[in-house]
Amino acid sequence: MTGKRRAARTLGLALLLTYSAILVLASWPAEVAPDFAAGPGELSRSFFRLFRTRAVNFLFPGRGLDQKGRRICVVVFGLQADGAVTRVYEPDDRCHPPPLRLRLNLFDGLVRNIVVVSTDAAPTARSRGRANRWISSLDGEPVEQLVGRLRSSETLDPLSRFFCRSRPGSRSVQMAVYHDAVDYRTGAVSSWLEVIHHYDCVGSVRLEGGWLSADRMRAAAPDLPLAPPAVNGERP
Amino acid sequence: MSGVKARLGGAVAAVERLYFDPVSIHPLVLCRIFLGTILFSCYALYAPHIEAIWGPHGVTREYLEQLSRVFGISVGPLALAQDHVWALYALLLIAAAAFAVGFMTRLSGLVMLLCHVVFAESRFHTWGWSPTIMPFIVYVVCSRAGARLSVDAWRRRRRDPDSPEVETAPGWPLRLIQLHVLAIYGAAAWHRIDDPGWLRGDVLFEVLTSDVWSRVSFDLHGLINVLRVATWASWSVELLAPFALAWRRTRTTWVVLLTVLHVGLELGSELGWWQPLMVSLLVVFWPRGLASRLVQRIERALPGGRSRVNEKKESD
């Protein structure tokens, strides 16, 4: 092997080893890795936050969202056959969320629903109803602020239009935030619904968002998971 | 001192052999076909909805613009291609098909990757497989995956019927894929070790009853204990995967277990193309010779395949 070829091979080996080391270090989560190993993963997340790009987040994107790091607790409640709401999943006891957790990360939910609508050429078992919902606490943002931000946002208009176009014959789209909040200190569950966005498919005019009580909403949509045990009841 | 030096030299030589010694290209050939097919299938299924999602008045563009205005988020590269979305889409499909069949393999792989980056960056919701597939395409593009079971190989044979068949190539692309797959299982499984949901075994029940993930609509409350056992079993398989796949004695067993796991997840839940992607990547851990036999068998079945030509020559 000539000298030049040997040098190129050594350089290539060094690059491969460096990349491999980064992969291995970045793959070991903070829960089991020493502090120094958090560097590559943290670098990737910083890049993600700074440039809002997912292209570098190639290892395991679920970690890239870093829900633990951002102190976001996703809790999933299920509706039992007898109508009681049961907590079926909660990720992290060490997570220290704000006192109230909010049901449904609205944007995630909406965007996921769009995927369902747009790719569901042959609907599978989509009739599962609304048994489970996302419950998120959004990194310390007060519920009132979040609702206000959503209500004033025009972002929901194109989503509404998309729903109307995807489902011919639809008359209107109502988007609601499910405030199934659990107070961590007392364990009390309070549950209510608020329509934050009302979109008229026929006229394609956005109507003023209105407040609806849980009772009124239940009258409009009786299968919503607002069983009595969940309203001002004990934490399941 | 000299002993340490010798051991260090031995270790460096071993690493060098690991990355640069020739390995069979057949697993990479199959990876190329699978990755191209996955991206082609994924985007082909979007065809009826391209305008609605990515078109000039599609939800993604409006959504992006609204997000940009309300939250100050960058719109991303789709904004550059928003008026040419059909051209970009067609280019992606052509490139993915060309990559899968091995036509101008490296160029088509790069074009496919770039187009996919543009669509994936549009903030349209896809599962995590979408960014994860990107480095694997790069590894395969860097390899000689287009040298067999491909249009490129067929054209080369037409030009020079006596050219030797490519069987091996430097091992580093294969090693990077293997390492990356181990890293994914490590990252996915080990961060759950303090997760009460996983520790209690509730996750599979939650997935199968969720209106986000589930494909089934049975009342599963009666099976909750069975699903707990299944959760712990599948988690154990993933937890041990980085070690079991690396160790030759347990490798084949774990390939089978992980394949069953991914197929089961695909049948019961909807996570985009995660499961096909991972099953495809497990090819690089298949028992030695299995990928080669499969590639050769397909080549024999194809009209004008190399093996058939060779057999004809031998019989002459």
Image (tube, rainbow, N blue to C red):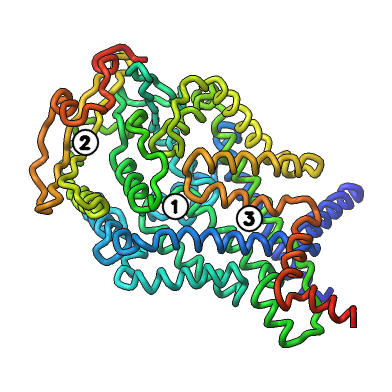
Which three-letter amino acid code belongs to the residue tagged 1?
A: Phe
Disc 3, disc 2: CB below 8 Å? no
Q: Position of residue A1 (x, y in %)?
A: 84, 73
- Which residue in the protein does label 2 denote? A176
- Which residue in the protein does label 3 denote? A19
| Residue A44 can be seen, yes or no | no
Q: Residue at x 49, y 27 (%)?
A: B205
Chain of the residue under the numbered disc 2 shown in the image: A
Rounded to the nearest angstrom, the CA distance separating label 3 from label 2 is: 46 Å
Asked if residue A179 is positioned above or below residue B256 in the image, the reply reads: above
- Mark closer to the chain start, 1 or 2: 1
Q: Position of residue A48 (x, y in %)?
A: 42, 51
Give the mark count. Answer: 3
Farthest residue, direction bottom: B159
Q: Foreground residue, A72 or A129?
A: A129
Q: Which structural element holds mark 3? A: helix
Q: Residue at x 71, y 40 (%)?
A: B254
Q: Position of residue A23 (x, y in %)?
A: 61, 49
The label nearer to you, 1 versus 2, is 2
- Mark closer to the chain start, 3 or 2: 3
Asked if residue B301 is positioned above or below residue B259 in the image, the reply reads: below
Chain of the residue under the numbered disc 1 shown in the image: A
